[in-house]
Image (cartoon, grey):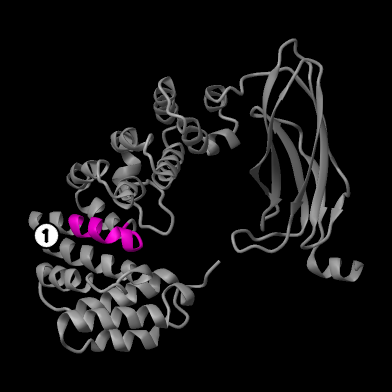
Amino acid sequence: MPTADELIGPEVVQSLLRSIRSSTGRAVKELEAAQETLDGLSLRERSDRLRDALLVDVPGDYWALQETLRRASTDPEFRGWLIWPVTSAVVTRAAQEESAESFQDALELLAELTNRLTSEFAIRTLLRQDLKGALATIQGWAESEDEHVRRLASEGTRPYLPWAVRVPELTASPGITIPLLDALYRDESEYVRRSVANHLNDLSRDAPELVLKTAGRWLEAPAETTMWVVRHGLRTLIKKGYPGALELLGFGPVSADIDGPHVAESEVPWGGSVKFSATVRNTGTESAKLAIDYIIHHRKANGAQSAKTFKLTTRILDPGESMIVEREHSFRAITTRRYYAGPHAVALQVNGQATEPVSFDLRGPEKSSRSS
């Protein structure tokens, strides 16, 4: 994964400097100074530092800023990660003025700039300022000829957009963005449809029944791509074994016998993998459509365990038919999870029904190095 320096680093700052200097015809001292202070900052902190410098280097009201940026946008280099601090500056100054005219123009400017990277992070400021007013404009973006603008309509309004500030009113009123998704779930662009699916998945955290109702409507007259959107949008509910989501995708209650999971080794070395297998047999009289997942019960710092579900496979088994499932789950170091030595467990989940967890121990790094 690229580092913060690779995304908003010296080359990006230089491109921003050249564009703003050219469009204003004067020195940009704050931006020049800011580029020397980025080391050690996170990606968001880098963006905020450049935003604040840009606002100093382009003094005046919102209209002075938008004029400068629209001139700068004629530069082919005015794209990429420099757009994050630029769009952040746009909404910061528009919000400060609290005028309907600057608010509306800021929305339009975000739509103009979004195809140069994305305006999804910046738009959150305007959503927080006036959600219903922003949505009135954003709904029209669903008919834009530009797929980037259509995606912005869905992505920028996601309740739990990664890296973005929260918009409390979105989570308090989860149905408020459904008209947007209704307009976009059959979009010709996979780029847009993926955003719709992720938005639907976000909504499932707070309003699962609303999500199921929406997905059910979409499946009443689906396009060829609708099932993928629904399946991807329900993925968290499926992992949780939510009955309505499973049934909507055809994974209803079944009669199945599960032998396992069987863990190959009761102790797993630090950075190694736990290997397990199981046999699943359809004991019913009809074919069974199975969604088979597995659950790792991770040890936490306080000694308790927390469960995380992982996809394994889907399969249709005829009456009496069996299948063997096998998997290696890695405990190598990753940035998104911290591991703790000690008791862990693994369970199998078939159509939302989980087996009893089977324990194994993750050895600590010192013990693992001595054993090797």
Q: Residue visible at 75% across and 42% down?
A: 346
Q: Quadrant of residue 347?
A: top right
Amino acid bearing label 1: Ser
Looking at the figure, which quarter contains the N terminus?
Answer: bottom right
Identity of the residue furthest to the top in this view: 285
Q: Which residue is mark 1?
A: 102
Q: Residue visible at 54% across and 39% down?
A: 236
Q: Nearer the viewer, residue 279 or 6?
A: 6
Whether residue 86 is in magenta: the answer is no
Q: Nearer the viewer, residue 247 or 205?
A: 247
Could you tell whether 269 is left or right of 143 in the image?
A: right
Could you tell whether 108 is left or right of 146 in the image?
A: left
Q: Nearer the viewer, residue 370 or 124?
A: 124
Instruction: From the top left corner, tell me how far across and down residue 332 is, in percent.
Output: 72, 61
Q: Residue visible at 47% across and 80% down?
A: 40
Looking at the figure, which quarter contains the C terminus?
Answer: bottom right
Instruction: From the top left corner, tell me how far across and down residue 268 is, in percent.
Output: 83, 56
Q: How many marks?
A: 1
Q: Is residue 243 above or below residue 301?
A: above
Provide the residue span drawn in magenta: 107-119
Could you tell whether 271 is left or right of 242 in the image?
A: right
Instruction: From the top left corner, tell me how far across and down residue 37 is, in percent.
Output: 39, 85
